[in-house]
Image (tube, rainbow, N blue to C red):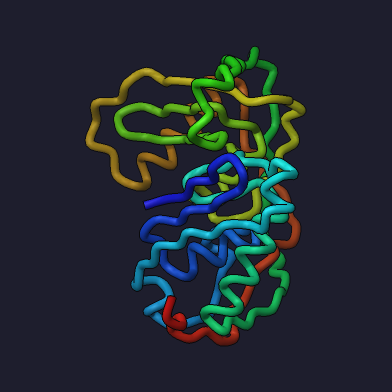
Amino acid sequence: MGTDVAPGGTVTLNRLPLKTMIAEAFHLDYWQIQGGEKWMEQALYNVVAKPPEAIRQSLPDTRHTWFTIDDPRLREMLQSLLIQRFHLKVHRATQPGRVYLLERTRKPLGLLPTKAVPAAAGSALGTFASIGWTEQWVLYDTTMAELADFASSYIVHRPVLDRSGCVGAFDYRSAADDSNATQIDQAASFMRMLEEVGLKLEPTEGDAEILIIDHAELPSAN
């Protein structure tokens, strides 16, 4: 399950529900997608989307995570695909409430800049960034914007804005935690990880953008 963006801009989505694909296409977190029916969360789809030759020749940005696509042109084309194939209709709204700022603390930054991968080594795949937790936190080729998005999607379920001032991508591996952590423990563990590397989430008030699904149908045949 997840996303790949190959050199040239071919987007492959593996075993994703419609709501997750909508979140990717509109560059929003899953919690920001509201409305719709149960099948939009349960039915899984595989998508292989190839951009026009003009886009392929312009070298689109291949940077992506499991559930995000950086290149705005590829996202716009994915929006069009979902609108055409699922007869998707949506509208945007805002919701007031808590937002968070990802900021530096006075502690030295404990993240290591990601070393550039030689072109030959990464020729078959696009640029992939990941954040994961099993018994430890592992960041690979992760920007502060991606870390903020992860915190928004999986930890606080509210907007998180990057105000760290840290430029570039970073790697990090925390010490192993051999406890049987619950979801709540993972959230607390994430906060501890931020503190360890010299970062914090500072709460404030603001507006959250949401996307409301007005209509969607099962997709047309291939």
Q: Is residue 99 left or right of residue 175?
A: right
Image quadrant of residue 178?
top left
Q: How many marks?
A: 0
Percent x, y for residue 33?
Answer: 56, 69
Image quadrant of residue 61?
top right
Percent x, y for residue 167?
Answer: 73, 25
Residue at position x 70%, y 32% from top? 103
Considering depth in this image, is 210 or 26 the residue closer to the camera? 26
Residue at position x 75%, y 35% from top? 163
Q: Is residue 133 left or right of residue 93?
A: left
Position of residue 79 relative to residue 192, above or below, is below
Position of residue 129 relative to residue 90, above or below, is above
Residue at position x 55%, y 51% from top? 10
Percent x, y for residue 62?
Answer: 61, 41
Q: Is residue 150 left or right of residue 53?
A: left
Q: Is residue 146 in view from this perspective?
A: yes
